[in-house]
Amino acid sequence: MNVAEIHGLTVRYGAFTALNNLSVSIPEGCIGLLGPNGAGKTTLLKTILGFVDPAAGGGKVLGFDIATQGKQIRQQIGLMPEQDCHIPGMTAVTFVAYAGELAGMPKEHALRRAHEVLEYCGLGEARYRNVETYSTGMKQRIKFAQALVHGPKLLLLDEPTNGLDPRGRDEMLDLVRSVSHGKGVNVIVSSHLLPDIERTCDEVVLVMNGQLRASGLISELKKIEGHPYDVELREPCPGFADIAVKNGGELLDSRSNTYRIIAPGVREDAVKFLLKCANEAKVQVRGLIPAERSLEDVFLNAISDKPTFDIPGAEK
Amino acid sequence: MSATSPIADLTYRDYDGPMNSADHRWWAIAKMMMRMAIARKGFWACALLSGWFYVVMMVVFYFVDVAQSSVGPAQINYFKTVNWKDQFVTGMSTAQLFLFIVALIIGIGTIANDNRANALLIYLSKPCTKLDYLIGKWVGIFIPIYCVALVPGLVFWAYIAMSFREYGSVSSAPWVPLQLFVISLFPACILASLCVGVSSLFNQGRTAGFTLFGIYFIANIFTKMMQGMHFVAPDNRFITDLFYSSIDGLSFGLSKLAMFTDGSLPMVQKAQAGAEIGRPDAWFMFPAFIAVCALSVWIAWIRIRPVEVVG
């Protein structure tokens, strides 16, 4: 089941078209929303939340219509915004409990749940401190906690690791991953940081100029046709590549002592073929791993006007 | 329990408890506003001070009553000269400054501080609409001010009803309790509307507070000028109406209209010529009241924009 189904969505700000006939299905799980600045990611989130009236098109989120059932959608959604935000003059536990009450939780349940969620987010010791005294990392966590307090079915995380130090970033990504895997919470992570997306998400939706450029499982998007392998040799050996090409292989790339080669025939024979070529070249193989593109390559290719390779799941 | 405690349960559990309807979220906002208001010492201090006139009158009435009991009513005929209804108009008038301070304490920062902290994002990402937010903020200011305006008057009425019934404290003004509920509406509506309107224009509660105080101060100077002109031309109705053209004045004038009285100076049997300005014209006061409230709320409405606060 998809958590969101968007059909022909067009959103305009005056003369500027932020989303241009966008159609996308967002499946369950942890989904990365990728795109350069101005691609329309935030507008898509705004539209899902019902902040923006589409000029055309529409869709459903968690089975609710985005045009007419904004309140019901927002009751099932938790938003962790990109920028600093809190309700002034409150301690963390009051703030998170209040966020729960705003979502519709009874007061006593909201308070109990606020304590639980703050503990879970690592703010248990600081829960009675005024939020305004929090550090950047703690403010990120409190935003996460207020988004999570009412047990949303869908979490929208806008740049969740903004301003965090490496350790804080690690902990935040662990939190995101833990709620999105096996806990029944669907997550959409909007981020420019591809390693964050790769670490937390299973699938990505790539948006550019208000249109969908690619979507699908990260592992599928990174896959290179023809089951290539990265062969790491003990030392650089051009002869190995020559032998592989002579025997029907295809050399895609070579860097120092690592060669990316597509073996002929079926996948099962590829390893045997590469080891045979190494044997012929009298060179020791140190590593042999199935090759894939980096997410950065996929991203740059998808947003490029002149893509250098086809991406599975890409919009033509 | 510490997060590092071996028995701390740090795993995430989904919430499966009860959920209220997504409608009427404004009440959650109003409740929180009131909770925060009553947690402030300044609120209670001003709330108590707002009833000072009634306290003074109760003390005066008590001692006069004691004195009258000692020397006999023939010598002191004070209670027969008291205009009971006018005490409530005067009480409402003397409470205005404290009601204004209460509004500054609990209400003026309400939207301005939210603007500074991007709190709108929190509200509007929940099942709250812009209307819920505005109503919640308005009601959260209105109810505390209404109670502060109403309770001292009701207590005073209970005192005089129980102690001075034989002097006509109830029979001469039978509708006073009901009228108190009405006249308390005016300052509460005006101040709540002004607070949300002015607050929405700023990103700092203090700036909004200074602005509202400036408006209050300048309007009061204007009414003092009108009071001076009233001595020169006491029959000019326009000047009489303009005398009530301030934040306090609107509430005061509307109170006189709702109590059907021209008012009198405290402890003066009959208004001396020129000493007390009579009641204003209803056709002037009610449109002015509605205009001030509507304009303030409209300003807040156009200033609250959910789109701006996202990204």
Image: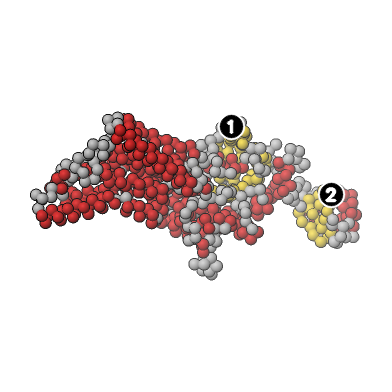
Which chain is disc 2 placed on? A
Image location (x, y in percent) of residue B310: 56, 43
Please state which amino acid type lies under the numbered disc 1. Gly
Q: Quadrant of residue B294?
A: top left
Q: Position of residue B181 (x, y in %)?
A: 28, 43
Instruction: Give the amino acid at mark 2.
Output: Leu
Q: Are marks 2 and 1 in contact (CB under 8 Å)?
A: no
Left or right: where does residue B218 sit relative to residue A162? Answer: left
| Residue in the picture at 50% in, 43% down | B202
Q: Residue at x 51, y 59 (%)?
A: A118
Secondary structure found at label 1: loop
Protein chain holding label 1: A
| Classed neighbour count for the residue bearing mark 2: other residues with Cα under 10 Å, few (<14), some (14–19), many (≥20) | some
Whether residue B125 is visible to the viewer of this picture, yes or no, is no
Task: Name the residue beneath numbered marker 2.
Answer: A251
Q: With B23 as the anchor, is A163 left or right in this view?
A: right
Q: Is residue B125 above or below residue A137?
A: above
Across and down, in percent, residue A219 comes to: 69, 50
Q: Residue at the location (22% across, 39% down)?
A: B271
Residue that label 1 marks: A14
Q: Which-is-in-front pick, marks 2 and 1?
A: 1
Along the line of sight, the residue nearer the viewer: B213 or A94? B213
Q: In the rendering, at what x and y percent does residue A213 appear?
A: 67, 40
